[in-house]
Amino acid sequence: MKILDCSLFLVALSYSYSVSGTVFGPSEQKPLTPIDGEKGQRPRPNIIFILTDDQDLHMNSLDYMPFVQKHLLDHGTLFRRHFCTTALCCPSRVTLWTGKAAHNTNVTNVVPPYGGYPKFVSQGLNDKYLPVWLQESGYNTYYTGKLFNAHSVDNYDSPHAAGWTASDFLLDPFTYWYMNSTYQRNKDPPVSFEGRHSVDVIAEKALGLLDEAHEASKPFFLGVAPVSPHANLWTPKFKHGGHSDLEDIEFSPPVPAERHSKLFEGIKVPRTANFNPDKRSGASWIRKLPKQSQETVDYNDNFYVQRLRTLQSVDEIVDSIVRRLEDLKILDNTYIIYTTDNGYHIGQHRMQPAKQCSFEEDINIPLIIRGPGVPKKSTSDIITTHTDLAPTLLEIVGAPLRNDFDGLAIPLTEESLAQASETRHEHVTVEHWGFASNEGQVLDSYPRLHANNTYKALRVISKTYNLHYQVWCNNERELHDLTTDPGQMVNLLHPDERAPERIAGAPLEKVVARLDSLLFVLKSCKAQMCVQPWRSLHPEGSVESLRDALSPRFDSFYEDRSTKIEFDRCEMGFILDAEGPQFGQDDFLSAFDPKWHEWT
Ligand SMILES: *[C@@H]1O[C@H](CO)[C@@H](O)[C@H](O)[C@H]1NC(C)=O
Ligand SMILES: *[C@@H]1O[C@H](CO)[C@@H](O)[C@H](O)[C@H]1NC(C)=O
Ligand SMILES: *[C@@H]1O[C@H](CO)[C@@H](O)[C@H](O)[C@H]1NC(C)=O
């Protein structure tokens, strides 16, 4: 059978049926957990989801959280290769709660027109996200803290966020103002907590919601999303969460609670090989950054310590939640998931404190899960991303998966984790649109915003290779071999670098051709195609990994490919006609020899 385009193949993969309005995934997907009421089976588990803001893995923030270590790391599994797919709060959170990559939500920024709560609503996602599905499956759902950016005192009720049994949201423009936050409970009007530490306010609200959830005698989900360790921020000109609001922002280091304000004196950002290096690195605006002065380094070290201090309040929340679960005798039947929206950099590649890049510091982030059957005091190196969390949660509660998830549920037992380490995919897609901000000092040489931070990137990690490939909207390219260069200091595709002839066991240009084709599929993938992208290039099913694709018998296939990832221009959002050829377009497919599209 000849396949003329990949859509037929996708239809076959995404077979689905519909019961009472809900779209269910393939019927062979068995719920992980038995439904309560059936004889001899344990009740459906509860879930507590703790979501911090901008927490790093690479600057060792977890080392400074003793309760996270005691209650979560010692009783759960740390996923060391967990990644966000867009290193920016709002797009990342929308991906997390919908199970879809940003190019499939088109929520790509923090404020309208390209992002924020209004864009989440106008994209029709307010009834297509996790809390709604959990409720449909018989769960009560609770949430306190930041849901999305531009979810504000002006628009919180037009409409209210759907899917919550009870909620207490942190609202803009006060979201990042540690000592003057505003929260909004259920359908009540917003309330200012001026003078109280925002994370201490959340701690009380979280415990209150936990008691409320327990009293309701139904299985529950509770989301707790404190602002730590995000920068302190005030937007004096904030109107309705519009884009112009971003031009006038006052950033300052995060503000800890008084009782933590003297901790960690003298601690500094880890001086890794990529910390304020003598040599330029990266591409585009990053490669133009000047080396930081001692004054800036000192400012940034203080910024770092302030982050660790604000995380102490989160650490205390973890302790108080675990102790309350123990008191209520439900700890053993509760999953606790701890993660963040995106990572953070301070000084690496000479960059000011911020995120929005695809370097490891920004994308490889903490994910810890403890709960029934999850290995204790354990680490896993399987590749997981934020697109996997919605499917994971639905699998935990025993609800059917949806057929349009871009991710794959994360295995949570020793056996399934061991199996996944042999069979799970090896790639991560990263995407970003718009500017990159600078949340540290604004000196002449470090502007507040860097334009044209629009790019597509890819991580491919196996036991034998570890690569990062990126294409910027000005068509600059980046390739890093993290096996030999974990700090990503040498862009092997930059004319100033002397690149080795071979990487990943093959000639460099052959590897690049494969990576480019893979990213070409991933940058516009949908559903199963995002999980098994090689199938779109090799529908005959013989290729599951970069290693397979590097087989010399595919050399001519990849060499013949005339279409490469190519932007037409830089845009602030996902404007399709700026993003060059798209996979699945006729002109692209005609570049293939039809023999590659045969089923075998
Ligand atoms: C704190 O926020 C409130 C509005 O919620 C505002 O009226 C007040 O002036 C703010 N406090 C300070 C110190 O600016
Ligand atoms: C950003 O990209 C646009 C168009 O792609 C270009 O005209 C502009 O000069 C770029 N700006 C910077 C600061 O590089
Ligand atoms: C994404 O949203 C923006 C802003 O509304 C819109 O201009 C753009 O066309 C959308 N992109 C796609 C691919 O639908």
Image (cartoon, rainbow, N blue to C red):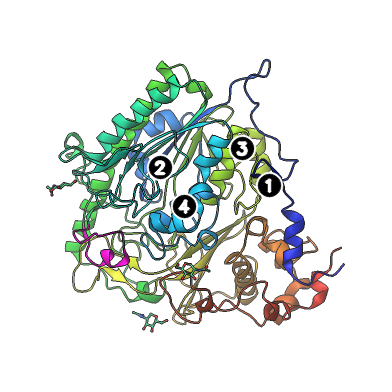
* Callout 2 secondary element: strand
Lower sequence index among marks 2 and 1: 2
Q: CA distance from mark 4 to mark 1?
A: 30 Å
**Of the pair 270 and 20, the residue shown nearer to us:** 20
Lower sequence index among marks 4 and 2: 2
Amino acid type, mark 2: Leu
Amino acid type, mark 3: Glu
Lower sequence index among marks 4 and 1: 4
Res. 584 image quadrant: bottom right
Q: Which residue is mark 2?
A: 51
Q: Is residue 442 visible?
A: yes
Height in image: 74 above or below 368?
above
Res. 550 image quadrant: bottom right
Task: Tell me whether circle 4 and circle 1 mark residues in contact (CB < 8 Å).
Answer: no
Height in image: 128 above or below 373?
below
Which quadrant does the C terminus fall into? bottom right
Q: CA distance from mark 3 to mark 1?
A: 21 Å
Q: Which mark is residue 395?
A: 3
* Callout 1 secondary element: helix
Q: Position of residue 354 (x, y in %)?
A: 32, 59
Q: CA distance from mark 4 to mark 2?
A: 13 Å
Q: Which residue is mark 1?
A: 422
Give the residues in magenta: 235-250
Query: Is residue 248 one of those drawn in magenta?
Result: yes
Amino acid type, mark 4: Val
Which quadrant does the N terminus fall into? bottom right
